[in-house]
Each structure stands twice: as C-alpha cells, then as structure tokens.
Amino acid sequence: MLPVKVIASEWMTPRYPEGRIEEMVADSIGLRCFSKKDISEFNHETYEKLRSDFGIYDEARDIALAVAVARKAMQGHMSVGKRDLAIFLSMQESSLSSMAICGEITEEGRTWLEPARWFSTIRRELELMPCEDVWVNAACASGNYGLAAAHDYVSQSPGRQALVIACFSMFPGSSHVFIDVGIAAMNTCRPFHTERDGTLVSEGAAALLLSNAKDIDRSNTCSFLGYGLSCDAYNQVAPDPSGDTALQSILDALDSAGLTPGDIDYINAHGTGTWVNDEIELAIIKRGGLQNAQLSSTKAYTGHCMIASALIEACICSQILVKGVIPLDLYRDSSIRALGNSHPKFVLSNSFGFGGANSSIVLGR
C-alpha cells in the first residue's frame, strides 16, 4: 500500500478544547482520568460557542464542531487548495432521526437530515469548491473507515488531498444504550484496570488532512501507512468473543503497511473500559504477536466520543509520532507492558464499533 502523508491533524474534547497532547501527558502524570465530573461541569465558553452560536439551525451543532476543527486543521497549510479537496465526514444523525420519528422536529430541522446539506454548509464555511463528498458511518470505527476511504482516494492520483472529519455532540439519551446493556461506568473510565466497570460517553471532533503532494513541508508530518477493516456482525452491541475478525483487521493493517508485529512500538487500544471489550482486545493483541508493544487507551483521558472516537485517536497518534510523547497508562493490567519514554516510530490504533465493525490503522514517522 502506498503511504500517504498526514499533513495536519486537530482534535477537541470537553477536557481538551485545544487538542494539545501536552495537556494529556500532564494529566497522565497527575493520574487524572476522565470522569463524570468532566461531563457535568463542562462549560468551556469557546467550545459552547462553537456548538450553540454558530448561526445555523441549533440541532446541527455537530456541523459547527466539524467546521471549527476543520478550519483549525487547515490553518497554515497553503498547500491545501480550495479546489479538488475531497471531504470524508462521519457525523451522528441519531438525535435528529429520533426527533423526526417522534414528530418533534420542525420542517427546517428535517433538512438537516440530508447529508448533502451537511457538506454544502461545511464547504461554504471553509470556502471550498465542490469536489467528492463521502459520508462514512461505521459506529465507533467510523473515523478509521473514513481514513481508509480517504487514503484510497488520495493514493489514486498525484496531488490529491482529502479532509477527513468526525464529530459527535451529546444529546439526550446519548448514554442510554450503555446504561441499558450494563456497560456504563459509575464514575470514571478506566480501560484495562482490574476494577474497571464500564465506559463514559463524551463528545468531541477531529479533522485530519491527507495528501500525496510532493511539495509539502514534511517536518511536522507522519505517514498513514496502512489499514485493516473487517465486520463480523456478531451482535448489535457486543463484540465477537472469539475476536477472530477484530484480529484480522489488525493483521491486515500490518500487512498493508509492510510491517511485522514486532515493528509496532505503541498501540492505542480501543480500550473502552468495559470488561468484555478490554479482555477480548488484550487477547487478540497477544494472539497477533504484539504483546511487546507499549499499549494504552486514551479514552482514559477523553472518554468515549462515539462516532468521533476513532479519528480523535488517530489525531492523537499522529501527535504522539510528531512530538515523541506518549500519555501514561493510568490503569494497567499487570500483563501489559509499561509505557516507556522512547520515541515511537510505528503506531497501531484500533477502533471497534457496534454491529461488529472492526478497524485498525498504522501510522509511522
């Protein structure tokens, strides 16, 4: 697979509205994990302004997040043209869909159920000319599916560029599915901890620019080297206990990147903090021969940002490669290798979504 350059990546969550990995590292040193307090006390003025005062229909606040994070990613990159920039968007439509079904949405609001409206608004606000627009939805694996599609698009022709965006904002009922199936944490998100009790839903957005242009500044870039996608359709919300198809996505990602399991320095795990997910993921990592890689889940800091989680974590991994820092693993099973201070060269990021959508990507420096 041809490598494609990641020329810019930006992300934001309630705790980290500026998307700075240095703040995450500081929190890791202070052993501060994501908790319900981060959600209940979240009132960041700038972030709230993006959501509610954007000047468009209020229920389309996800679009406000998408535009804000994309604009930030594009700043300072003159090589990104206004023409021929494809957009791959992952955005949850659940809140609007449920309102429409219940008859609790206006005619104006119904227009926001149309993906074409989402793309036209984003292009207008970013002053981008029409080009390919692709909506990608693979639940919590959406960001990686979007990156895979964008990689294939960009690598097909010289000079192509793609903007990958994912966003999720909280709406009434966001956490209900986790509560209903008994996997919502009581207070904190503690992936791989021996006393973990579930995950915590958060919100956020991310944008990542891919390019195969030859004239880009490579000093602050990394490469998107490969990906693996699979789907087992085992259950609507539960992962396949065997982990076979999830493992296949990892092995396919390594194969497409031309790497072996021993080449991976760090794994950003899906690591939701639920008993079932973390146990299965650890097992397939060991089965895949990756037990010597450093491993952690950044959901310990961000919470589970649902449809935006995979792309947020891809952006975090790109910053890990460029800046050479890894947030400490706040909670660690004794069988997991402790994180060191070495600068990683190759990073694997896993994201597994509802419905059995599995994905793994490999980034390198």
Image (tube, rainbow, N blue to C red):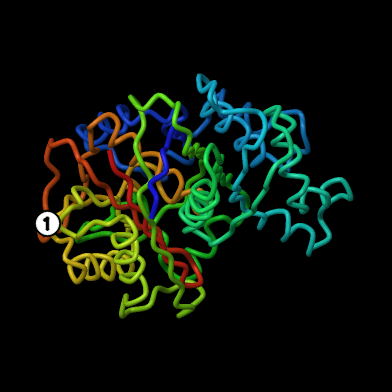
Position of 194 relative to 240 (above/below): above
Residue placed most toward the observer, 49 or 87: 87
Question: Could you tell me residue 258's position as x and y percent?
Answer: 27, 57
Q: Which residue is mark 1?
A: 292
Question: Could you tell me residue 290's position as x and y percent?
Answer: 18, 61
Question: Could you tell me residue 194's position as x and y percent?
Answer: 19, 61
Residue placed most toward the observer, 74 or 270: 74
Helix, strand or loop at label 1? It is: loop
Question: Could you tell me residue 100's position as x and y percent?
Answer: 79, 59
Q: Quadrant of residue 273?
A: bottom left
Query: Would you say 115 lies left or right of 204 here?
Result: right
Q: Quadrant of residue 336?
A: bottom left
Residue placed most toward the observer, 30 or 24: 24
Query: Would you say 63 lies left or right of 8 here?
Result: right
Quadrant holding the N terminus: bottom left
Q: Amino acid at mark 1?
A: Asn
Callout 1: 10 Å neighbours few (<14), some, many (20+)?
some
Position of 334 relative to 323 (above/below): below
Q: Residue at left 36%, top 39%?
A: 316
How many dots with numbers? Answer: 1
Q: Residue at left 48%, top 34%?
A: 213
Position of 110 relative to 11 (above/below): below
Quadrant holding the C terminus: top left
Residue furthest to the right in view is 107
